[in-house]
Image (spheres, grey):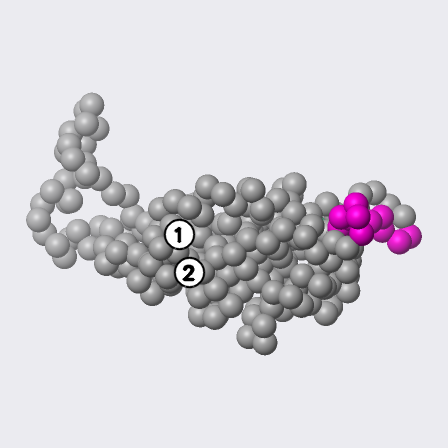
Amino acid sequence: MRIDVLTLFPAMFAGPLDESIVKRARLAGLLELKIHNLRDYAHDRHKTVDDRPFGGGPGMLLKPEPLFEAVEALAGEETKVILVSPAGRTFNQAIARELADEKDLLLVSGHYEGFDERVRQELADDELSIGDYVLTNGSLPIMVIIDAVTRLLPGALGDEQSAHEESFSHGLLEYPQYTRPADFRGMQVPEVLLSGNHAQIAKWRSEQARMRTASRRPDLL
Ligand code: 4G0
């Protein structure tokens, strides 16, 4: 899979995507990731990428010309172009699975007060938000999306973790888990987990997952 990113803060991307599973996926050739500076597509000598909104009001907007030229330069026929802003549909695991099936993504970071509406109309195939809060720019949301998608690429996780992903996909929160010691500072591991009775353990875990989901995330049931 190929992912291109368009941002005003390319330096933010050094670090998080050079670690762990994303690093391994890039080294293994499962993910080709390229970060592009939107300012490189500004044409005037001041490298202007923003302007004031028609009709007045606070803040600045990303002006259309650099965005159109950047997307025209970076997106091919098959590229899915995705804007990131608080007005997008909320990203979740199901969307991560959809995106992991794409060949090319171009993720465009919003900045300031957002985009000129013509960018939405003409350039965007989709618009995503990572949740109902406002950040200084869309770079952190883009890194969140890349992380969630990359770990779903075939071969990105070890076998142990793949199995775990399956257990998440049944749509419940995880059951309580324990490792050694069985008695830690007087806090005991539930007896059933030490019993060796695998049918009982499976029943306990499914009850616990259901109870935890009901109390913390009833919206998932
Ligand atoms: C567009 C995404 C982009 C519009 C981006 C802000 C949070 C998210 C930005 C705005 C972002 C998210 C209207 C403030 C950049 N913040 N929740 N900031 N406005 O995914």
The N terminus is located in which quarter?
bottom left
Find out whether residue 85 is within the magenta segment. Answer: no
What residue sits right under mark 1 in the picture? 22
Where's residue 161, x and y in %?
Answer: 28, 54
Where's residue 23, x and y in %?
Answer: 38, 50
Tell me where residue 68 sits by quadrant: bottom right
Q: Nearer the viewer, residue 36 or 56?
A: 36
User: Which amino acid type is shown beneath numbered disc 1?
Assistant: Val
User: Which amino acid type is shown beneath numbered disc 2?
Assistant: Leu
What residue sits right under mark 2 in the picture? 31
| Chain part drawn in magenta | 44-55
State left or right for residue 156 relative to residue 92: left
**Residue pictured at 68% horizontal, 52% vertical:** 40
State left or right for residue 88 relative to residue 173: right
Disc 1, SS:
helix
**Residue pictured at 42% horizontal, 60% vertical:** 31
